[in-house]
Image (cartoon, helix red, strand yellow):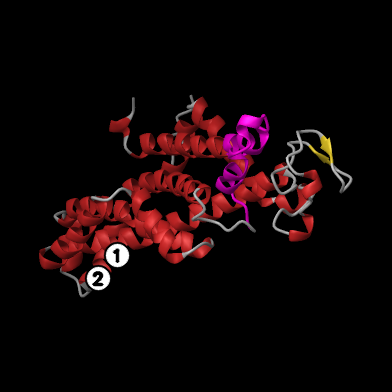
Amino acid sequence: MNTAIPPMETPLRGFLREFAQDRVAVVAFVVLALIVLLALLAPWITPQDPYDLSNLALMDARRPPGYVGSKGFTHWLGTDSQGRDLYSGILYGLRISLQVGLMAGAIAFVIGASLGTLAGFSGGRVEALIMRIIDLQLSFPAILLALVLSALLGQGKWPLIAALVTAQYAYFARTAHGAASAERSKDYVEAALSTPLSSFRVAFRHVLPNCLPPLIVVATVQVASSIALEATLSFLGLGMPVSEPSLGMLIANGFQYMLSGRYWISIYPGIALIVLIVAINLVGDQIRDQLNPRLKR
């Protein structure tokens, strides 16, 4: 009789096993991975660089899908209002959306988690000062704050990221504050404070790691929100410059031609944007359910 004890399942293996049981999340993850792969390989799998001004061909502007342009290749998704290949523009636009979304989310994560942990762990006047600033910022819609900052900072990738970070770090800070406040009264924190470790090291070495699960959930939501905000600002002419068309800029370029039947200029970039945001949100929902089983439906 075999009495061997089966190996214990690691938390990571259990997480992956439960994640694989949700077919919707698996499909969303595969779609998201495919989008990221296409964006990374864009310079090698697209017929032209839409950021290169020498590729402008006004004679080929607003051509339908399948059109063979003056450059000698087929525009499978048509061309935009500047004669650039729309397929190339979408893949390069996805690169911008992912770069801006991930960088803005990562920077906002670091800033917000640090401030929230510091406020929740310190208490007193430090907590009151930080949280009053956070509460004041959260009283304004993120899109309104991002619009104002983008208008002040100007166009470009880094001004856009700065505007998105400023508009979104407060969500991380609020979440980290609640988690750090709950952790502050636990025994392991009291034990760590009784050692020669400084309060700063206890907060960021012991408390912050235990605040990560809810922060990871917020991060998935805010990355998708950053991508949507970038597209909105670019659509309004306050995000990426015309020389570096993002998905929002491509949608804006074709919006005025919708009624004339040239739907492809806006529809295809819009579909790519929707698929990207929905895939991130579906994956984020499953991560949230795994990290907090009480939220499972």
**Picture residue at 23% right of the left edge, 64% below the top:** 118
Image position of 194 with respect to 70: above or below: below
Above or below, 102 against 253 in this view is: below
Instruction: Give coordinates of residue 173: x percent, y percent.
Output: 28, 56
The numbered mark at residue 213 is none
Which residue is label 2 attached to?
200
Is residue 270 shown in magenta? yes
Query: Which secondary structure lies at badge 2?
Result: helix
Which stretch appears magenta?
244-272
Q: Position of residue 172 (x, y in %)?
A: 32, 53
Q: Are marks 2 and 1 in contact (CB under 8 Å)?
A: yes
Residue underneath mark 1: 204
- State the residue in front, 175 or 289: 175
Tell me if 89 is positioned left or right of 249 in this view: right
Q: Amino acid at mark 2?
A: Phe
In this view, 143 is above or below 191: above
* Residue 290 position within the rendered picture, expressed as x and y whole percent measured from the top left: 38, 36
Comparing 192 with 153, the one in front is: 153
Give the residue displayed 41% in from the left and 64% down from the top.
152
Q: Is residue 252 magenta?
A: yes
Magenta part mainly helix, strand or loop? Answer: helix
Instruction: Choose top left, top right, bottom left or bottom right for residue 185.
Output: bottom left
Count neighbours of disc 1 (C-alpha within 10 A) and say few if under 14, some if 14 to 19, many if 20 or more.
Answer: some
Q: Nearer the viewer, residue 36 or 184?
A: 36
Q: Position of residue 194 (x, y in %)?
A: 15, 69
The C terminus sits in image quarter = top left
Query: Mark 1 belongs to which amino acid?
Result: Phe
Label 2: how many Cα within 10 Å (few below 14, some 14–19, many 20+): few
Q: Is residue 177 left or right of residue 247?
A: left
